[in-house]
Image (cartoon, rainbow, N blue to C red):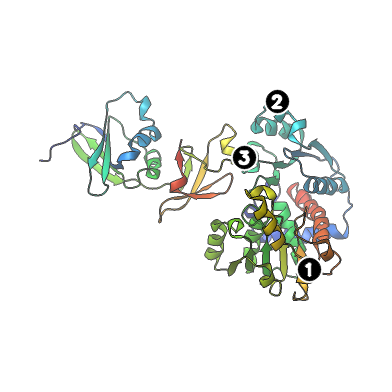
Amino acid sequence: MKELIVSAIDTGTVIDHIPAKSVMQVVRILGLEDFENMILIGTNFDSKKLIKKGIIKVKGKFFKPETINKIALVAPQATLTIIEDYNVKNKTIVEVPEEIIGIVQCPNQNCITNHEEMNSEFFVVDKTNGIKLKCHFCEKTFGQEEMKIL
Amino acid sequence: MKNRSLVSICDYNKDEQLKILEVSKEFEKKPKQRLLDGFVIASLFFEPSTRTRLSFESAINMLGGRIIGFTDAGSSSVKKGESLRDTIRTVNNYSDLIVMRHPLDGAARFASEVADIPIINAGDGANQHPTQTMLDLYTIMQTQNKLENLKVGFVGDLKYGRTVHSLTQALANFNCEFSFVAPNFLQIPTQYKEFLDEKGLKYETLANIHEVIPEVDILYMTRIQRERFSDPQEYEKVKDAYELKKSDMEPAKKNMKVLHPLPRVNEINIDVDSMPEAYYFQQALNGVFVRQAIVSMILGIK
């Protein structure tokens, strides 16, 4: 049996295949900072899929698909494993949602969302060649390289 | 269309846009009718604009509606630091419809989500100016008797020019062909080229205005702003290269018309004004009829 670098959890969620540089963003997007359960965070592991990957294990927590899919922006290849009693109950991959509310800051400095207290809102207009977002307010379209996670 | 905001030209479909043109024609024949008696319309100009504001106010006055509002943010509570959300909520209580111009992109969309009364976007930053687009469509229809299968040339600042973006989107419903004439760094953004690609429409991007004059039915001129240039000498060069003069017009087609959203600076020489192709002042007048149509349709009177 392969030795686990990050200890196993008895019940909860394992998020694997997070690009190493995005691990902290995933923590923020899922609001894990305010969590009281045990969380194991590991990063910079060697990976076949990614050059360096991160992994997050959250004890006693199951995420709703709409919550977990938010991380697709920073970790499009992430896998999600539900563990119950040390056994794998279910394994899925994240999906890029159709709409993204909050999380991303509109790169257009002249966009109302950067000046008024309000949530940003984007439509995902392309999922195939990297993610492309269109701002619901200023109507500008931009690619992943311009995205800034709040 | 009753009670529906007009924020972006894409908010109304092709049939609704054609209906606006039809109603505009009725107002052109009879612009003074007391249809808006008892209605209060808020005109909120967070950024000064002469033409758009006066044309809205003239349109509403001719129909007997009352106008409240401000003409620049300096004379409003915005100066005291009030959020747009609060300004809109307040005005919402005092009026039946809000016409607004704002310097930030997306401000009108946000306002339309805060208010329960409809919003007409009279320009939000560099984003949209849908009533300008409707009056452009009306003018094109008036001069060509159709909107389908026209060849339209856009000249000038195509990168920041919101009128160009919205009109391109609107004309894409009518199988038009487009020529975008601009210096490289002010060319039409990729987003709009992709949009035309998706629709399978033909377009070309070029730098020389003389190449398009013999080809197009509509030559849509826009202003190149000095602020866009870091090098003043570069501005002088570009400005002269994109100036339309009477002598350039010789190869134009008989039905060709020159449009411009105004104000113009020097991109159309005044020697063009007296030519039959010059149509930009008539275009500005059409703004009144089109805005009468849009206001009365949204208020459910037409």
Instruction: Give the residue type that dot 1 points to.
Output: Thr
Residue that carries the numbered disc 2 in the rendered image: B80
Looking at the rendered structure, whether the residues under marks 2 and 3 are on a common chain is answered as yes
Q: Reading the chain from its start, which is encountered first: label 1 or label 3?
A: 3
Q: Reading the chain from its start, which is encountered first: label 2 or label 3?
A: 2
Dot 2: chain letter: B
The label number, if any, that marks residue B132 in the structure image: none
Q: Nearer the viewer, mark 2 or mark 3?
A: 2
Residue that carries the numbered disc 3 in the rendered image: B110
Dot 1: chain letter: B
Q: Where is residue B228 in the image (x, y as percent from the top left)?
A: 64, 49
Q: Is residue B185 above or below residue B117?
A: below
What is the secondary structure assignment of the residue under circle 2? helix
Looking at the rendered structure, whether the residues under marks 1 and 2 are on a common chain is answered as yes
Q: Where is residue B200 in the image (x, y as percent from the top left)?
A: 54, 68
Residue that carries the numbered disc 1 in the rendered image: B143
Q: Which residue lies furthest to the front in this view?
A: B233
Q: How many marks?
A: 3
Q: Is residue B145 above or below residue B23?
A: below
Q: Which of marks 1 and 3 is in front?
A: 1
